[in-house]
């Protein structure tokens, strides 16, 4: 192991990792905020056709991600190995379910280039999925031992709560925000 | 905590796969200067065409636009952003706040290697079929991805991929800089005792972390439009006589996203320059910086305002008059904290014990060019003045003065100032002075006349200017003059490289603190500082970074780690155990 890893005492390490994660979540939050802004602005163009239905797989995905979030919380609070495995399992299942939703959308003739709303659907769910994959990679790389490394567990839990919040916001954006709603809020200016 | 217990380091782990912030900073700096040299050559190639149109057959219209695009992108992103944050930020933040290293050294190393990868991908675009993109550095769709623009086959894809990799690198670096400033300051180093260089880089990093996602979003969406047939930005277009599959996309959406990144980008480059200039002015005029708190708040306020002015780049794209009013107002408000900084630098110099060292020359030069560029910014911030001038050389003159020449002068000043700490040796003063005068006078001769060309109505971005009745012949004579100066100034930059290379090997020993500066980086136990920076204990800070002009025997300053009761005795701080 590189000697520079020993330059910093491990006690000082905890607030640094916490701060680092908060800063990272701010960056990711900004990224999704900007995707959402682009989505809402693109909606104003006359060719906009909203997504016609909510693929049922997305409800399953939502449940799985809630499950992962709860499991991470248990892995941190109860220091449970089982909860750690369940959290990773739920996250992988979430990704599979999202892919399944993509297949269902494609089967319904709503491919990536068939309309701007579809393009955003694949883009936003894809970028969100990449952030889940990134979280899983870090969780695996950190090689946690739930009993001993509570900080990693806590940070994973925090990141997954964030991913869940992000997913709920994106879910609501993709299917709940309509041109009429945007018009009601933003329209009617001077 | 153990430190420095026999690092078993080979050449490779020490200089190549290094996790030492100082080595990473040097890697960043050398890479940025190398790609910056490419950007410089590209600008001279453009000037050859502008000064002597048609004389150089290899510069055809397509090449010209490719040079223009690559010059802009390289200078703004790959040179200045990388050099200020990756170079100066990496080297100075841990040393100035009294930390042993960045908080995530591995991530820091990764940041450099991603940056290098981004630079190599970008340079690779010169060799792909069709050459690099010629869409202009703003890469506006739809023209950036439609046939007719150079480099639509591969160049634009390579450019976008390179930018995405760069953003990943900048984010990894930025996480480190922000977390280090927030969590790794040494005992006594309160936020309001940090040198202004750290404040500038810290604030600029926050801007970068929040603004680069906008470039990321627009880059990804443009890649989708180009490669996967989506219609985020591309409307229904008939191109070369056939209907493209796109429909309904909004080019304006891209402009909003791009400039939501693009305007903070100006301050990502300017704020570190402000910080560096503040330090240089204070050290070399031997005076406390005037209004330290004001300077900090000015940096923070400029950073905040920079997020609500982006549409002043889009006045000519058409917008609701109230929007124009809003963005013009916010733009002009930025002049207040900025002018405050200029006044404070001037008041620091006033009745100071000014030493016209090479870094000081560059600092004073910066204040001059920045005021000129900033004043024309006030012109262009007004919608009604901007619209007739927007497409002319007046804008070229404005942004080159304010964010081309000025930050580059700050870079040079900073490099000369910290060179003795980085290398342990002093640069050649005579060469440094010659380099300053050629660069300073030369850039004025290049860019100042462009204001007149702009007022004549000479349009920017054009490849050739023959047969326009409204452009007099004298404009061509002026262009030839500018080209000759630009070539001379371009070649003269070799003096700088020569000076750095020669002095790093052969310069005279500089000692640990040749400028008698008060901030922590000049008080390391070794020069150049070793891995870990501080020996057994990190320093303890008792005061701000600008306590100059306190005459006491031979010393006229109090270093940050000098305890209050030791000022009279002129002693250094006793070493204390860091927490």
Image (cartoon, grey):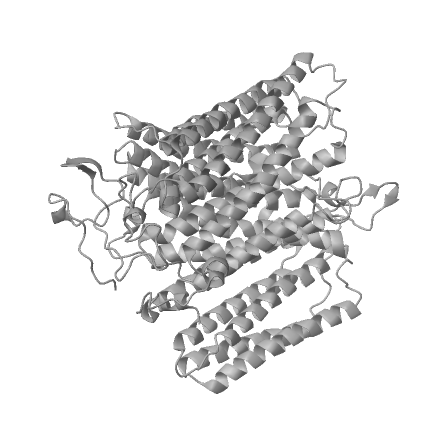
Residue B417 lies, with reference to residue B454, above or below; the image says below
- The number of discs equals 0
Q: Quadrant of the N terminus of chain B?
A: bottom left
Residue B54, percent from left and from top: 75, 24
**Residue located at (88% from left, 41% from top):** B241
- Any part of residue A42 in sight: no
* In front of the other: B134 or A65: B134
Q: Quadrant of residue B392?
A: top right
Q: Position of residue B97 (x, y in %)?
A: 32, 52
Depth check, front residue: A173 or B240: B240
Q: Camera-side residue: B395 or B441?
A: B441
Q: From what the image shows, is residue A139 above or below residue B447?
A: below
Locate residue B565 relative to residue B474 in the image: left or right: left
Quadrant where the C terminus of chain B is found in the figure: bottom left
Residue ID at (67%, 74%): A57
Q: Quadrant of residue B556?
A: top left
Q: Position of residue B317 (x, y in %)?
A: 65, 35
Along the viewing direction, whichever of B468 and B107 lies nearer the viewer: B107
Left or right: where B47 falls relative to B10: right
Task: Residue at 61%, 32% (x, y): give it.
Answer: B315
User: Where B577 sits versus B38, above or below?
Assistant: below
Extreme residue in the bottom direction? A82
Residue A170 is left or right of residue B361, and the answer is right
Relative placement, left or right, of B474 versus A26 is right
Corner quadrant of residue B533: bottom left
Going by the picture, which residue comes out furthest to the right? B241
Report whether residue B9 is seen.
yes
């Amino acid at each position: 192991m590189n000697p520079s890893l020993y330059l910093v005492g491990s006690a000082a390490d905890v607030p640094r990792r916490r701060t680092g994660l908060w800063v990272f979540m701010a960056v990711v939050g900004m990224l999704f905020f900007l995707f959402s802004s682009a989505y809402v602005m693109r909606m104003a163009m006359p060719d906009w056709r909203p997504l016609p239905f909510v693929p049922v797989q997305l409800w399953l995905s939502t449940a799985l991600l809630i499950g992962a979030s709860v499991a991470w919380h248990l892995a941190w609070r109860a220091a449970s190995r089982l909860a750690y495995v369940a959290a990773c399992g739920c996250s992988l299942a979430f990704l599979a379910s999202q892919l399944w939703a993509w297949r269902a959308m494609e089967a319904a003739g709503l491919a990536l280039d068939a309309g701007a709303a579809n393009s955003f659907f694949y883009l936003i769910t894809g970028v969100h999925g990449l952030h889940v994959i990134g979280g899983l990679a870090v969780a695996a790389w950190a090689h946690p031992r739930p009993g001993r490394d509570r900080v990693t567990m806590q940070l994973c839990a925090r990141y997954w709560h964030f991913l869940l919040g992000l997913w709920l916001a994106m879910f609501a954006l993709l299917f709940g925000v309509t041109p009429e709603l945007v018009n009601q809020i933003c329209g009617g200016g001077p | 905590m153990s430190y420095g217990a026999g690092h078993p380091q080979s050449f490779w782990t020490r200089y190549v796969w290094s996790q030492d912030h100082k080595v990473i900073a040097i890697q960043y700096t050398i890479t940025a200067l190398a790609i910056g040299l490419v950007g410089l050559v590209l600008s001279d190639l453009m000037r050859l065409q502008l000064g002597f149109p048609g004389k150089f057959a290899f510069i055809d219209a397509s090449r010209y636009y490719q040079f223009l695009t690559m010059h802009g992108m390289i200078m703004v992103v790959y040179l200045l952003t990388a050099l200020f944050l990756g170079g100066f930020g990496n080297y100075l933040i841990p040393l100035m706040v009294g930390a042993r290293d960045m908080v995530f050294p591995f991530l820091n190393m990764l940041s450099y290697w991603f940056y290098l990868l981004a630079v190599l991908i970008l340079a690779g675009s010169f060799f792909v079929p069709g050459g690099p993109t010629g869409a202009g550095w703003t890469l506006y769709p739809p023209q950036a991805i439609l046939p007719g623009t150079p480099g639509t086959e591969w160049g634009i894809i390579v450019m976008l991929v390179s930018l995405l990799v760069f953003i990943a690198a900048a984010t990894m670096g930025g996480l480190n800089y922000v977390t280090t400033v927030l969590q790794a300051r040494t005992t006594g180093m309160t936020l309001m005792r940090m040198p202004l260089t750290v404040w500038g880089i810290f604030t600029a990093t926050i801007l970068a972390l929040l603004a680069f996602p906008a470039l990321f979003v627009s880059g990804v969406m443009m890649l989708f439009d180009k490669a996967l047939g989506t219609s985020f930005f591309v409307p229904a277009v008939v191109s070369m006589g056939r209907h493209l599959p796109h429909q309904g996309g909004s080019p304006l959406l891209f402009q909003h996203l791009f400039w939501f990144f693009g305007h903070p980008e100006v301050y990502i480059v300017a704020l570190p320059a402000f910080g560096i200039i503040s330090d240089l002015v204070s050290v070399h005029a031997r005076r406390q910086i005037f209004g330290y708190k004001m300077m900090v708040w000015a940096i923070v306020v400029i950073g905040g305002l920079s997020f609500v002015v982006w549409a002043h780049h889009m006045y000519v794209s058409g917008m609701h008059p109230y929007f124009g009013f809003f963005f013009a107002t916010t733009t002009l408000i930025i002049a207040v904290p900025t002018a405050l900084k200029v006044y404070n630098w001037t008041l620091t110099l006033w009745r100071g014990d000014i030493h016209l060292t090479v870094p000081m020359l560059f600092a004073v030069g910066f204040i001059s060019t920045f005021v000129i560029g900033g004043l024309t910014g006030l012109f262009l911030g007004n919608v009604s003045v901007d619209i007739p001038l927007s497409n002319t050389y007046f804008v070229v003159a404005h942004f080159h003065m304010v964010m081309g020449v000025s930050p580059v002068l700050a870079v040079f000043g900073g490099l000369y100032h910290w060179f003795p700490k980085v290398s342990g040796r002093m640069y050649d003063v005579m060469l440094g002075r010659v380099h300053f005068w050629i660069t300073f006078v030369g850039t004025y001769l290049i860019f100042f006349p462009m204001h007149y060309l702009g007022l004549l109505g000479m349009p920017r971005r054009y490849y050739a200017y023959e047969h326009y009745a409204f452009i007099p012949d004298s404009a061509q004579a002026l262009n030839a003059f500018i080209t000759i100066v630009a070539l001379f100034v371009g070649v003269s930059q070799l003096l700088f490289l020569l000076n750095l290379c020669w002095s790093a090997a052969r310069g005279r020993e500089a000692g640990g603190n040749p400028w008698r500066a008060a901030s922590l980086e000049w008080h390391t136990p070794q020069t150049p500082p070793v891995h870990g920076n501080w020996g057994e204990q990190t320093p303890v800070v008792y005061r701000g970074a600008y306590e100059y002009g306190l005459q006491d025997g031979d010393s006229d300053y109090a270093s940050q780690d000098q305890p209050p009761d030791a000022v009279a005795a002129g002693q250094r701080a006793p070493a204390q155990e860091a927490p």
